[in-house]
Amino acid sequence: MRATLIYGAGDIRVENVPDPVLHEGTDAVVRVLRSCICGSDLWPYASKPAEEQGDRIGHEFLGVVEEVGRDVTGLRRGDVVVAPFVWADNTCDFCREGLHTSCRNGGFWGAGDVDGGQGEAVRVPLADGTLVELGVGEDSALLPSLLTLSDVFPTGHHCAVTAGVNERTTVTVIGDGAVGLSAVLAAKRLGAEQIILMGRHEARTDLGREFGATDVVAKRGEEGIERVRELTGGDGTHTVLECVGLEPALDTAFGVVRAGGTVSRVGAP
């Protein structure tokens, strides 16, 4: 099959690699229908030292189950599934607390002998705990939208849930990228009464308004902080969802959070 491998900064190749096969009874093999590039894929693309042996890359994908191991009970051939950005058992204490990236038995796509998501097929370890059946056919027009469930929307949702967003909270979302917009959508779904989106890209902030932002603040630094304070009667918001990851964004978060409020940070530069 064909898959992407990264050999160093700026050096990604599509090559022939062995077809995935089951290693354990808890594995499944998924034929990939959709995959995408995450912002975090750009880190090794920009800085990875050159190596003779390429590494598989990609952690956002959905596809069709082609084969399941003898111990897999929740999936069957033909299911259309989405994979989150890590594989996990979904039973350990960390998973039960919603911290699947710290799963005691899990790991990351493309690490060791585990396939990356940017290929024609993927061996999925701990398939019952990792894959989520989507309930659509492989020709569904929703597939591009459902692909956001692999990483970007759950990141924004986790940010909002961790901050305790509910119908009684006011929210500031810092950042109008994909994660920030997902955080706006999550805050709306959780019932937030006021959602202030801090961003300066009009096309994105317009989408943020569609997703539920009640206010948009394009100013940055002290001017931006002052504007959020004006919008909240001088108090700031109960929760701040920091979705940028740079130090100025964190400074802004502490500048706009209400006394006793919560800053939830998932931004990655």
Image (cartoon, grey):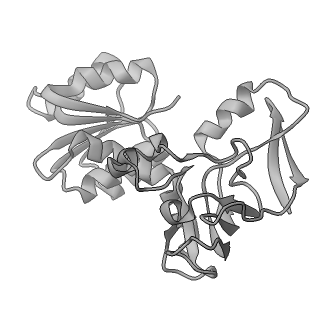
Number of residue marks? 0
Q: Quadrant of the N terminus?
A: bottom right
Q: Quadrant of residue 180?
A: top left
Q: Is residue 206 visible?
A: no
Q: Position of residue 45 (x, y in %)?
A: 73, 33
Q: Position of residue 155 (x, y in %)?
A: 43, 46
Q: Residue at x 43, y 56 (%)?
A: 90
* Vertical position of residue 135 compared to residue 88: above or below: below
Q: Residue at x 43, y 41 (%)?
A: 176
Viewer-closest of 147 and 162: 162
Q: Position of residue 162 (x, y in %)?
A: 28, 42
* Vertical position of residue 237 compared to residue 150: above or below: above
Q: Residue at x 49, y 50 (%)?
A: 152
| In-image side of 266 versus 47 (left or right) | left
Q: Quadrant of residue 172?
A: top left
| In-image side of 5 versus 107 (left or right) | right
| In-image side of 172 versus 247 (left or right) | left
